[in-house]
Amino acid sequence: MKIEVFEMERMQSTWENVVEYDLSESGVLPVSLGELVEMGFDLDWALSTPLTYSQGNGTPELREALTKLYPGAGIDDIEVTNGTSEANFMVSLSLLKEADEFALEVPNYMQLWGVPRSLGAKVNKFHLRQDNDWEPDWEEFEQAVNPRTRLVYLSNPNNPTGSVLSRQAMERIVARCEEMEAYLIADEVYLGAEIHRERTPSFWGMSDRVIVTSGLSKAYGIPGVRIGWIVGPPEIVQECWTQHDSLTICPNKLSDAIARIAVEEENREALYSRGRALLQENLKITEDWVSGLGEGFSFRAPEAGAICFMRYPGDYPSVELCERIRDRQSTLIVPGSQLGMEGFLRIWLGARPEYLKEGLRRVQIELA
Ligand SMILES: Cc1ncc(COP(=O)(O)O)c(C=O)c1O
């Protein structure tokens, strides 16, 4: 399998550690190991435990803890992975074959643009529409999810718009997947990063066609440990484990132990609250900033997630605009074209407020 370049990830990994202000990030400000020790992570255990391989599909303790997030799921319905990206990758590898069709919600985290195409599948896009509160374009959706469609992917809350699907929209999507006998990957890595609204409902339990992927990277603020998971029908989860054996064998042992602490209810809620306070402050800063930019700049306030997706006036290509900002201001943001929608810029809301303000000041110089 020859995989195509994932443009956004390549752009980030090339530049994020080079620039002075990285506003291309997308999760809540990461926590430190010290903070996780305060939550109960046993550092002495970590210092003395032999660094063996861990259980391939995740320790039973971690999977047991995760079942509490997904009512009705047992530990055999869960595979722990190295990040949500590995979860998405393994589900695609498990389910797609040449000439299948794959439906992709855009804009989005575009990992599952390249992977299905590299597997020989045809990708059909359906758009979220800004003029309709970022609800799907239902006509496109129905064309994209057809009798040849094997798999559908969406992120909810969505990266990059920060929108959350209504209950009716969720039901309509699931009903269509059932009717067409397609599976749905609901990537819920931003669940828990709600800014002012109530908790995003999970797709879990709506149908046996639903596969949820998620992880610690965004709402929990723990991307560096690389823990994600798949929750789905046991035969699919089993197939993903087979993929896992040949891909990375197992999650990192220390990371599995950290994840067991992070997902405990009390700690999870504390991490979500920490994120919420920061996102509320940063959203206000960003709204004030956008309203000072002048005509043509707009965004619909994200309901959840650590990013905002701003439309800009004119038809200047977003990649060139971001390159100019990077070159002249040493500040990195993401061009809409790398998220499947031209004419927009994605800006990180998860940074420390002072860092965000300085990054925005620099971006504004180039937007003037
Ligand atoms: C929707 C979505 N899914 C998956 C990922 C990758 O997450 P992870 O760090 O858990 O691999 C990202 C990262 O930005 C994302 O936005």
Image: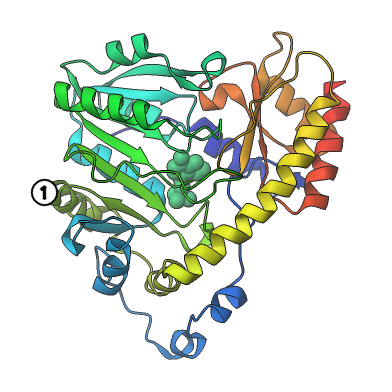
In the picture as drawn, the residue positioned furthest to the left comes out as: 235
Q: Does 225 sit left or right of 103 as displayed? A: right
Which residue sits at x=26%, y=37%? Answer: 92
Q: Residues within 10 Å of mark 1 (few under 14, many from 20)?
A: few
Residue shown at 35% from the left, 27% from the top: 168
Give the vertical position of 288 relative to 353 (above or below): above
Please state the horizontal and vertical placement of residue 353, each as a whole percent of the image: 78, 51
Instruction: State the SS at label 1.
Output: helix
Give the labeled residue for mark 1. Answer: 235
Q: Position of residue 10 (x, y in %)?
A: 55, 38
- Which image quadrant is residue 106 in? top left
Q: State whether label 1 is within 8 Å of ligand 1.
A: no
Image-based side of 79 in relation to 30, left or right? left
Q: Quadrant of the C terminus?
A: top right
**Residue type (three-letter) at the residue carrying disc 1:** Glu
Residue 354 on image: x %, y % = 83, 51
> Which residue occupies the foreground of this view, 40 or 236?
40
Is 339 above or below relative to 69? Answer: above
Q: Is residue 267 visible?
A: yes
The residue closer to the viewer here, 277 or 53, is: 277
Q: Quadrant of the N terminus?
A: top left
Identity of the residue drawn at 55% across and 46% down: 194
The answer to whether 348 appears left or right of 19 in the picture is left
Rendered residue at 34%/64% (across/down): 251
Residue 359, x across and y down, in percent: 80, 41
Residue 327 can be seen in this image: no
